[in-house]
Amino acid sequence: MDGLVTFVKLPPVRLGTPIDWTADPHGNRSWSLHLHTLRWMGRLVAAYERTGDRACLDRAGAITDDWIRANPRGGPGVSPWAWAEHAVALRSPALVCLSEHVQTRELWDSLAEHGEVLADPALYREGHNHGLDQDIALLVVGCRLGRARWRDLAVRRMTASTELAVDAQGVLHEQAPRYGLYVHRRLGVALRAIRESGAEVPQRLLERRRALESYIAHATQPDGHLVPIGDSPADARADGFAHEGPAVRVFDGGYVFGRTAWDDPAASYYSIRFGPGRRLHGHEDHLGVTYYSHGRRILVEAGFHSYERTGYVDWTRTPEAHNVPVPTSGTFRPGTATRLLHSSVGASGQAYELADDAYGVRRTRRVTVNHDPATMAVHDTVSSGTLRSLWHFDPALKVVSRRPGAVVLAGPDGFHVTVLQFPGEGLAVRPALISTGYLRTAEAVTVLSPEAPSVLTVIVPGSTSILL
């Protein structure tokens, strides 16, 4: 009501009157997008519906009128975010909510224009979470304006697009578990909108949403947070997903998720990446592993920082920001696929073998995970030349002891992790910035193996006896 808004956890901004729709006070792309979604205006409509306070509705109408006048599509000086496809998709439902109570020519003409943009196949993001938001928006705009062809188009597109985005096992091809959670939630909104529209809910849509639940459950660490793979913030949670079935599962879309038990915060947990080359919200993380044990994160990745275009954000997507083997010769070829050659899953341990030629030479990784006692052993080889393997540790772990081929890290509570490498001569320890959440970082320890044709790394959580 006072023109004060807070987007993406950045400091509050007072918009002023009239609103400057080109404002970018934080130099943040996400903030600029959220300004133009007008979802914050929609909260005023919700407040009016809840309380009956007419001032809230009048304020919502004034904000919308100002936006319509100031942002003609294709007009000079209009922010590029005003008619960006995702802004249109997220703004349209807010305008539909307002139109329940405000029936001005300007608002209804704007709704029709939004529908035309949403229906334009040239602007549609098929197989993408933005496309799902476009479908939801087209459906509700079509219902509001009585255009059944828009509603039916939205349902058809949504079904086909979801089958492209989510495979039969539930893996989202955007390559980030956090986006699996987003798509699951938005599909819930979509299903409700379809039912309320009077259309029949496609069974295929229901099946893919149910499959997605399994992927999300397996991608959730014992502490309740999603494993920070791809553009998945390290602090993102996924609560309440059913987890029937085995504790270890290989997803053909490029993931191994394993744990010793469900519903136990102290369980061991690991992830391994392979499969199709990087796309959308994925990182160059193939052959990468994460590891969680004794109720603690041990091996982590640089993770997701933001959508800003900075050198650091670019680095978080590179192989070096992940726990991978990096050949010392050859040129990295982005988007290279990785094959899972072998897997052996037992109750007390599992073993996997993966390979690719992302650097023009064959690099092979063999991962063995044992659970009693908890250990992870990783053997990296390269067909010619040498490699170095990188290991990024949770920021809570600091180096307390070193000797050739071995490092001991400890947390503030005295919990220890031992790292052994063979060969040991040349092992290095260096700092790295790890993303702990949106726009947040912390300094962490990275262990860099010696340069060799073959490197064996053993991670032993909860023990230092091997160094004594």
Image: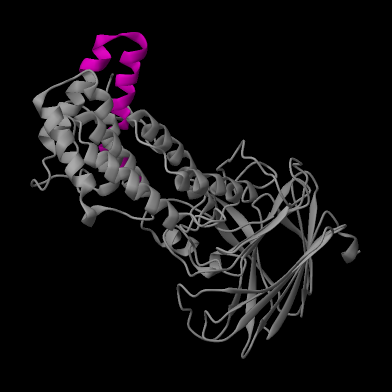
Q: Quadrant of the C terminus?
A: bottom right
Q: Nearer the viewer, residue 235 or 237?
A: 237
- Coordinates of residue 234 in the picture (x, y in percent): 57, 48
Does 151 appear above or below 180? Answer: above
- Coordinates of residue 358 in the picture (x, y in percent): 52, 79
Magenta-highlighted stretch: main secondary structure? helix
Residue drawn at (87%, 58%) of the image = 373
Is residue 351 shown to the viewer in this render?
yes
Residue drawn at (47%, 39%) of the image = 185
Query: Within the magenta stretch, is there residue 47?
Result: yes
Q: Quadrant of residue 456?
A: bottom right
Residue drawn at (20%, 35%) of the image = 147
Quick check: 78 left or right of 212? left
Q: Nearer the viewer, residue 301 or 192?
A: 192
Does 267 appear above or below 334? Answer: above
Residues rendered magenta in the picture = 30-58
Q: What is the residue that sits farthest to the bottom in this orientation?
A: 384
Q: Nearer the viewer, residue 425 or 248?
A: 248
Q: Quadrant of residue 42?
A: top left
Q: Quadrant of the N terminus?
A: top left
Residue drawn at (28%, 42%) of the image = 152
Q: Nearer the viewer, residue 24 or 114?
A: 114
Instruction: Count the marks.
Output: 0
Quick check: 166 left or right of 34? right
- Colour scheme of the picture: one colour
- Coordinates of residue 131 in the picture (x, y in percent): 34, 49
- Coordinates of residue 165 in the picture (x, y in percent): 44, 55
Quick check: 398 left or right of 16? right
Is residue 376 shown to the viewer in this render?
no
Query: Within the magenta stretch, is there residue 107?
Result: no
Quick check: 215 left or right of 20? right
